[in-house]
Image (cartoon, rainbow, N blue to C red):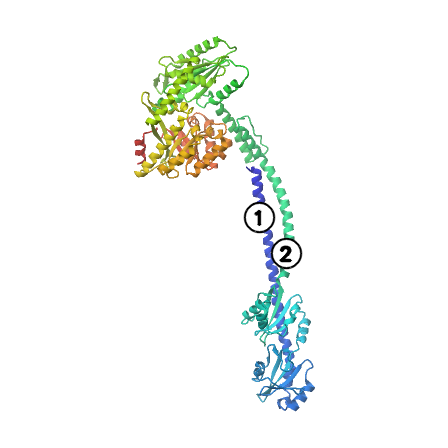
Amino acid sequence: MRSLRVKVTLFSSLLLISLITIMFFGAFNVYRSSLENTIMESMHSSADDSAWYLKNFIDGYLAPLEKLADHTLVKTMNMEAQLDVISKQINPNYENVAVIDLLGIAHYIDGDKIDLSDRPYIKKALTGNRSISEVIISRKTGENVIVAAVPIIDADRVVGALIARLDMSLLQQYISTRSLNTTNDTFIISNEGSVVMASGNHKEINEKNLFSLATEDLDYENFSAFIKAREAFESGSGEFELEGTHYYVCYKSIVGTKWKIYIAIKKQLIVNKLRDVLIILTSVGVIISIMALTLTWSMIKKYTSPILELNQLVEKGSEGDFNVHFIPTTKDEIAHLGLSFNKLMETIKTLTYFDPVTHALNRNVLKAEMNASINNESIESFSLIMFQVEGLQLLKEVHGFECEDTILKEFNSRILTTLTDGDRVYRFDEDTLVVKLSWEHDSDENMIQSYKRAKQILDLLEESYRVNTKTLNLLFNVGIYTRSLENSHEDPILSVLAATNYAKQLDGERIVRFDNKLHQTMDEQKNLINELYRAVRSDEFVLMYQPLYKLKDKKVAKMEALIRWNHPQKGLMYPGDFIEIAEMYDVILQIDFWVMEEACRILTKWEKQAIMAKPISVNVTSKTFESKHFLKKVDELLSRYEIKPGLLEFEITERVVIRNMEENISILQQLKLRGIKVSIDDFGIGYSSLSYLVKLPIDSVKIDRSFIEQMNHSKSAKVIVSTIISLCKALELQVIAEGIELESELKYLEDNQCDIGQGYYFSKPVTLEEIEGKLS
C-alpha cells in the first residue's frame, strides 16, 4: 500500500506535469498557429504581388505588338508592305512573328505560310480580342510554345491579326527581378492546365499541360486535381501533393488571362521549424518540471511528516501501545488533530483496560494476565473467584438497562469493600465479575482461605438490591480456582468458568471449587453438546427478531435474527446458555447454518406473501465463518431460496476477522460478490479497530452497546461514540448503534448523524408473527 506521502507526491507530480504539458503545448500550438498564419499571409501577399507584376508584364509585352498592329501599312493587309514594316520595327524579344489573314493563314516574315484557322487563340484574335494560347505544339517549329495574338483593326473592322511566340525565359527573368520569394516554389498555370512557368526543381514541366501529365504520371495527379478544383476561384489557399512532397499553397488569378499564379512552400520546411521550437520547449519544460518536482517533494515532505508520524502512532496504538503521544511542532489543523489523537488514546486506554459500567478491569486485562502467568516459568500462587448473577438478562428485558447498570455498579462496589492490597476485580462478562486473590506461597491453606473469601463476598452480594423503588433479591453462581503445583497445567479462566457453570447447575450449593471432580463436568458438557445436536435435528430452535430503525425517519431498516433454544426440559434458553459451549464443537456450524436457512426461508415466505421484506441480519460465529463449508452453504441457500441481493446480511465481531486477516478478508470479498452485506458487531472493544477497519470490505459498523449505555454518565464514552461515527462516515460505512434505551441517547446519536439504531427504546426482540405485523 502506498503511503500518503507517495500518493500526494504522485498526485502533485501528475498535476504539475499535466499543467506544464498543457502550458507548453498550448504555447507550441499558439506558435504553430502564428507561424502558419504568418507564412500563409506572406504567401498570399506574394501571390497578389506576383499576379499584379505579371499583369503588367503581359500588358508591357503585348503593347509593342498592338502598336505594330495599328500601323497604317499593316492595316492594308498588303503582305509585302506588312512584312517590310514588321521586319524593320519588330521587337527583338518577339519570336516567330506572323500576320494572320481572315482565313486564318499565318504569313511568317521568313516567307512560311501555315494554316492556323483551327487555333482557338487565332479565332479569338480575329473577333477583335487579344489572346494568349495554351501550351501548344508549334506547326512551324514542332516545339511546345505559348503564342500571343492581337487583332489588326481598320476602320472598326478586323482585317487580320498579328502573332508572336512568348519568350518564357524573359518571363522568368522578369519575375526574378521583382524579388519574389525565392524560398517558395512558383507555378503559373492556366485554367486548361498549361504550365506557363514552373520554378525550382519543377522546370521540366514548363510549357507542358499538367492535366495531360497527370494521366501519364501519378506524381502529378493530386496537383492536377487541386488546379481543376480551383478553376472557378479568383484566389485562395490550400494543400496539395506533388512528386511525393506536401505543399501549402496560395494562388491568385492574373487579370486579363486565364492564368493563375501559385506560390507554394514545402510543408516539411514548416514542420522543421516547428520541430526545432518543440525541442526547445520540451527541454525548457523538462528543466522546469524537474525544478518544480524537487520543490514539490520538499514541500510535501515537510508538511506530510506530522501526518506520517501520526499514522505511526495510530499503528502503535492499534497494536495495544496506548502510551503513544503526539508532540505538535506547528499550530495548524494537523497539530489540532494530533492533540485530539492524544485525548482519544487516553480515552481508549481507559476503556480498553476498564469496564465503562463498573470501572473494574475488563476481560482483556484478565486474559492477558492469565496468559502471562501460564507462560511464566515460576508458578504464581493466586485464586480466581468468579461471581455470576443469575437472571440478569431477564431483569434487563423487564426493567431496562438502567436496572442492569445499577445492579452491576452495586455488585462491584460490594466486592471492592472486601478487597485487600494485591486483590483485583475484573468484569469478565455481561453478568460476571472475577476477583483475583494473590498468595505469598503455594499451600493447601490458600484453597481454604479463597473459599472463606468467596463466602464472605457472596453473603454481601446476596443482600437485597434497591432499584427504582423496587427491592430485588439476586442469586449468584460462584466458581473458585486456586492455582497450585498440582493444577498449574490447567487454564485458570477455563477452570474457574467450569466451576461457575457447574455451580449454576447445582441446587442450593452456590460455591464450587475447581478440583478433579470437575473433570466430570466435561461429561456434562458432552451431554449438552449431544442435546444441541438433537435440538438441531428436532427443530427445537426458534428465532426472535429485533427491528433496527433508521434514525432519520424512524422507519424499520432491517432486523436482527436472535436464536433461542426451546429446550424440552429447561424451557426457553438464551444464546448465553449454550452458544459458548457450542462454539467449542462443530455443532455450532449446524446451529449457525440453521439460523441462516431459517432467515432465508422467512425472506422467501415474505416474498410469496407480498409482505414488504426487510433485510435480516444473522450473527455468524468465528468457527462457522472460517469453516471451509461456509461459502458453499451460503451459495446453496441463496440458490435454493432465490434470495434477492441485499436481503441477507451477516454480523461478525472484529476479533473474528483479525485472527486470520488475509484469509477472512478474502471471505468478506466473496460475500460482497454474492450481494451479502456484512456488519462488524461489538465494534470499539477490540485492540485492532483503528488499524484494520480501512482494510475490511464491509458495509456497516455496529457500535458496542457498552459505549451507548455509558453516554449519559461518561463524557469519554460520548467522545468514543462520536469518533467512531466520524471515522465510519469518512470511510463511507453505515453506522449502527445497539442498546439504545433512552431518549437522550437517541438524541446524541441523531445529532452525530448515526444512521441506524437498535434497542429497547424501539423494540424488544419479538416473535415472527409480531415482526410481520410491524412490516405489514
Q: As drawn, is 220 to the left or to the right of 470?
A: right
Q: Quadrant of the N terminus?
A: top right
Q: Is residue 343 above or below residue 420?
A: below
Few, some or many C-alpha atoms within 10 Å of disc 2 (few <14, some 14-19, many ≥20)? Answer: some
Tell me which amino acid carries mark 1: Ser
Would you say residue 740 is visible in this rendering? Answer: no
Q: Is residue 518 above or below residue 355?
A: above
In the image shown, does 703 or 102 lie closer to the viewer?
A: 102
Tell me which amino acid carries mark 2: Arg
Does the residue at mark 1 contact the one at mark 2 (Cβ under 8 Å)?
no
**Location of residue 135 by image quarter:** bottom right
Q: Position of residue 99 (x, y in %)?
A: 63, 86
Would you say residue 573 is visible in this rendering? Answer: yes
Q: What secondary structure is marked by label 2?
A: helix
State the residue at coordinates (57%, 48%). 18
Q: As drawn, is 598 to the left or to the right of 322?
A: left
Q: Is residue 129 above or below residue 649?
A: below
Determine the residue located farthest toward the top in the rendered image.
445
In the image shown, does 3 or 198 lie closer to the viewer?
A: 198
**Location of residue 76 by image quarter:** bottom right
Few, some or many C-alpha atoms within 10 Å of disc 1 (few <14, some 14-19, many ≥20)? Answer: few
Q: Going from the N terminus, do you reach mark 1 or mark 2 first?
A: 1
Residue pointed to by mark 1: 18
Q: What secondary structure is marked by label 1?
A: helix
Q: CA distance from mark 1 to mark 2?
A: 21 Å
Q: Which mark is drawn over residue 57?
A: none
Q: Position of residue 594 (x, y in %)?
A: 36, 30
State the residue at coordinates (38%, 36%). 636
Q: Which mark is drawn over residue 275?
A: 2
Q: Position of residue 464 (x, y in %)?
A: 36, 15
Q: Quadrant of the C terminus?
A: top left
**Location of residue 84 by image quarter:** bottom right
